[in-house]
Image (spheres, rainbow, N blue to C red):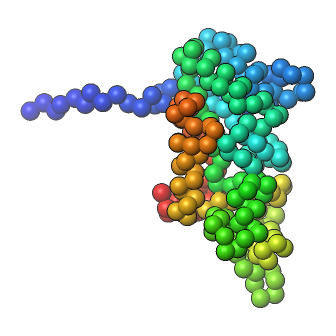
Amino acid sequence: MPQAVSQTAPPWWKGAVIYQIYPRSFLDTDGDGVGDLAGITARLDHVASLGVDAVWLSPFFVSPMKDYGYDVADYTDVDPLFGALADFDALIARAHGLGLRVIVDMVFAHTSDQHRWFASSRDVPEGPHADWYVWADPKPDGAPPNNWQSVFGGPAWRWNAARSLYSPSVPQRRTGRLPPVPPSGRRGRRERKMLSVYGGKLDTHDRSVRCFRIVAFRHDRSACIRP
């Protein structure tokens, strides 16, 4: 007996041609020497002419730029270096007018130490964000909890005097400012979902971002055992 052929269409991204754009080096429109969102919008016609299906944007969120935007201090706004939310709206509108989908990098495995979540976790040990980050007690002699080394070189742990605990320095030891966020906490999952799917000022319903790329989760071992 012949098998029925499934009529379900595959996800759009399977087989799609995706053009990655690193905003700060793409096109500068305000003369400060750094690329910006307006610069991306200005060249989307050319990108579309290449026959691609989507553009993938590296981080443009508020950041101290110790790791070139991958150290996010606020997931819900555009860093002034790249423009404003109005510039992002214009980019989305132009992309969709050209038939391009937009993918945005979301860096949830770590944040800048300037993020309000980390400040709360560091300063209020019994507060709502206390378990949002990885903290570890020192050994009796004050040494790090183990001898792990960062994939970027040097010890994987950094002492935090405010909390008198160690915090991982992964994934970027050279900045020392990227505290990892454990994906296992219930509140953490809820807020990350809100930011990436429903809420904040950068949301899929209001701004029609078609897809998110979750960055650097491989550096957090708990991500491998807790989907």
Quadrant of the image occupied by residue 31: top right
The one of 55 and 88 positioned closer to us in this rendering = 88
Viewed as shown, does residue 68 lie left or right of 220?
right
Q: Residue at x 70, y 19 (%)?
A: 41
* Left or right placement of residue 87 versus residue 19 in this view: right
In the image: residue 20, left or right of residue 160: left
Above or below: residue 52 compared with residue 71: above
Name the residue rendered at 30%, 30% in the picture. Answer: 8
Classify the position of the N terminus by image quarter.
top left
User: Is 212 situated above or below 83?
Assistant: below
Q: Please give the name of the residue rendered at 72% of the width and 71% of the height, measured from the top-left corner.
A: 124
Q: Depth check: 188 or 99 in front?
A: 188
Q: Nearer the viewer, residue 223 or 120?
A: 120
- Inspect this view and state whether residue 4 appears: yes
Residue 45 image offset from top left, x and y in percent: 66, 12
Query: Residue at image x 67%, y 74%?
Result: 126
Residue lying furthest bottom: 140
